[in-house]
Image (cartoon, grey):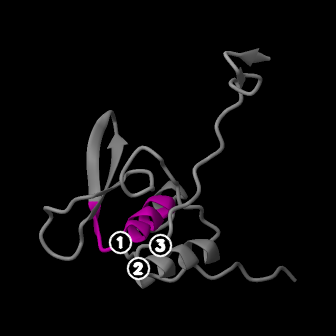
Amino acid sequence: RREAGRDTSDLTAPPPPPPPPEPSTAAGAEAIQLAEREGLTLAISSSNNTGYKGVCYNPNQTGSKKYQLSVRVGGKQATLGYFATAEQAALFYARREAGRDTSDLTAPPPPPPPPEP
């Protein structure tokens, strides 16, 4: 259908998901590779300044860790930590959502289960 000179037939279709942001640093690229190796998907978002769900850049934070990861827990906002890159924060979020251990961001993924005899 056309309306005022434009095609409106696809206005009810959901918009395509935003493309994942480019890694901010080498450490960010490494976090993306870790997520891929662990079979995790970094949750992207178009509603904040980093491109990742729950992650925002906080330039006033002291030190080198300026990316804040926050989630809603029981209806309240909770900060899970500050990270050096947005990708590291997004990896932490993905691990948390997958129910993985988040005590050490740099820990390698768990080994695969042994093959059955």
User: Does the CB distance between marks 1 and 2 fall below 8 Å?
Assistant: yes
Q: Can residue 106 be seen?
A: no
Q: Nearer the viewer, residue 19 or 89?
A: 19
Give the residue type that dot 3 points to.
Pro
**Residue closest to the far right:** 117
Q: Is residue 5 left or right of residue 47?
A: right
Report the Cα–Cα distance between label 1 and label 3. 9 Å
Q: Is residue 59 left or right of residue 104?
A: left
Label 2 element class: loop
Task: Answer few, some or many: residues within 10 Å of disc 2's Cα (few below 14, many 20 plus, some between 14 and 19).
Answer: few
User: Can you identify the residue that label 1 sits on?
Assistant: 85
Give the residue type that dot 2 points to.
Thr
User: Can you identify the residue that label 2 sits on?
Assistant: 25
User: Does the CB distance between marks 3 and 2 fall below 8 Å?
Assistant: yes
Whichever of callouts 1 and 3 sits on the residue coming sooner in the sequence is 3
State which quadrant residue 116 falls in. Answer: bottom right
User: Can you identify the residue that label 3 sits on?
Assistant: 23
Identify the magenta region.
81-95
Task: Answer few, some or many: residues within 10 Å of disc 3's Cα (few below 14, many 20 plus, some between 14 and 19).
Answer: some
Residue displayed at 35% across by 72% down: 85
Identify whether 99 is placed above or below 87: above
